[in-house]
Amino acid sequence: MTIVLLVRHGQNDYIGKRLAGRLPGVHLNDEGLKQAQTVAQTLKELPIKSIYSSPLERAIETARPLADIKSLPVIINHALLEVDFGHWTGMTQQEMESQSMWHTVQTNPIDMRFPGGESFSEAQERITKGLFEIISLYDKNEIIVCFSHSDAIKLAITSALSVSINSFQKLIINPASISILNFTANRNYLVCTNWQPSLAGSLPAEIFPASP
């Protein structure tokens, strides 16, 4: 079916400090803007058909340099939104760890529903449905790029691989990293996860194996 590049947004001042979630007005900082340019330069030679993004500013700002280079629009898709963390949105790490449900988030996330927000299961269903609606528009081995968020990408990967949500916390998705899923008629493949162009240089051609 389709090759999907899942790109996490670049660095911003909330990362490592507060849970940004769906807060509006969270923009890339200087490092994040540089990361967005690096992603664009890394992917510019690929025959990308379309570019999608979460509606949050930090995702759109990460997508824009690639869209400009490829002369493609950034298509906003709400399925690519971060998990709705409800009342936890804006909390510091210390505040989250003090919550009685913190242990559930870390060890049994399949049972977690954020007060005033989504459960991880609902978020995964939303993201998975949205991705399949997107890829249904494209032919085999066509490449699309989706700019999204850490937990959203983790949930997309575990869904594509039919892995329990309880395993998603074992994945690491760094800012401006690229994870690649190849959706075929027979099965889904995880080509790579958390590939960081700022550390690894040019994208190797062999990263896209031929589909069976």
Image: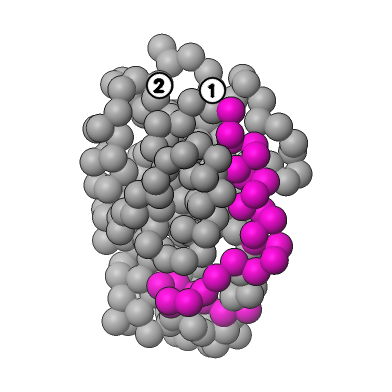
Q: Is residue 143 magenta?
A: no
The image shows residue 23, relative to residue 186, as above or below, that is below
Q: Which amino acid does label 2 sit on?
A: Asn
Q: Nearer the viewer, residue 41 or 202?
A: 41
Q: Which of 96 and 7 is in front in this view?
A: 7
Q: Can residue 45 be seen in this view?
A: yes
Q: Is residue 112 left or right of residue 90?
A: left
Kindly state the secondary structure of the residue where label 2 is placed.
loop
Q: Residue 46 carries which label?
A: none
The image shows residue 209, relative to residue 43, as above or below, that is above
Q: Can residue 7 be seen in this view?
A: no
Of the 4 image quadrants, the one containing the N terminus is top left
Q: Give the range drawn in magenta.
A: 17-45
Of the 4 image quadrants, the one containing the C terminus is top left
| Residue pictured at 52% horizontal, 59% vertical | 61
Q: Position of residue 110 (x, y in %)?
A: 35, 61
Q: Which amino acid does label 1 sit on?
A: Phe
Q: Name the residue under label 2.
A: 141
| Residue pictured at 30% horizontal, 70% vertical | 118
Q: Residues within 10 Å of mark 2 (few under 14, many from 20)?
A: some
Q: Is residue 92 left or right of residue 147?
A: right
